[in-house]
Amino acid sequence: MGPYPTDVTEKAYNGSDRNAFKFGFTPQAELWNGRLAMIGFLAYLLWDYQGYSVLHEVLNLIH
């Protein structure tokens, strides 16, 4: 048995697959929320790298 997850460890939280797409306050929803947040943050960083900086424009309004 190696360090990789098995069916036993994947179903340890609430008896169902951790990668299932479930709504509500479940461990599955929290995993998907984190994944989508990481995708959104990466998309913002790429958008900012292309020169369309929303943060820069907001900070210029404040200054």
Image (cartoon, rainbow, N blue to C red):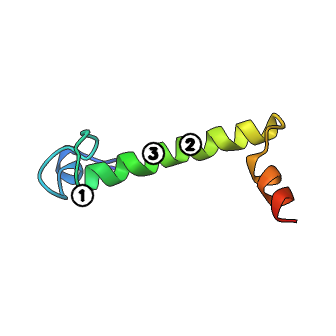
For marks 1 and 2 on the same chain, the one whose residue lies earlier in the sequence: 1
Q: Is mark 1 on a helix, strand or loop?
A: loop
* Measured Cα–Cα span from mark 2 to mark 3: 9 Å
Picture coordinates of residue 44, whole percent (x, y): 66, 42
Q: Is 20 displayed left or right of 62 in the figure?
A: left
Picture coordinates of residue 40, whole percent (x, y): 56, 42
Q: Mark 2 points at which residue?
A: 40
What residue appears at the point 75 percent right and 53 percent down from the top-left corner? 55
Q: Is mark 2 on a helix, strand or loop?
A: helix
Viewer-nearest residue: 57 or 27 = 57
Q: What residue type is labelled 2?
A: Gly
Q: Which amino acid does label 3 sit on?
A: Arg
* Measured Cα–Cα span from mark 1 to mark 2: 21 Å
Mark 1: few, some, or many residues within 10 Å (few <14, many ≥20)? few
Viewer-nearest residue: 2 or 58 = 58
Viewer-nearest residue: 45 or 4 = 45
Residue 46 - label = none
In the image, residue 35 sits, relative to residue 60, either above or below, namely above
Q: Is 8 displayed left or right of 49 in the figure?
A: left
Q: Is mark 3 on a helix, strand or loop?
A: helix
User: Which numbered mark, 3 or 1, is in the foreground of this view?
Assistant: 1
For marks 3 and 1 on the same chain, the one whose residue lies earlier in the sequence: 1
Residue 25 - label = 1
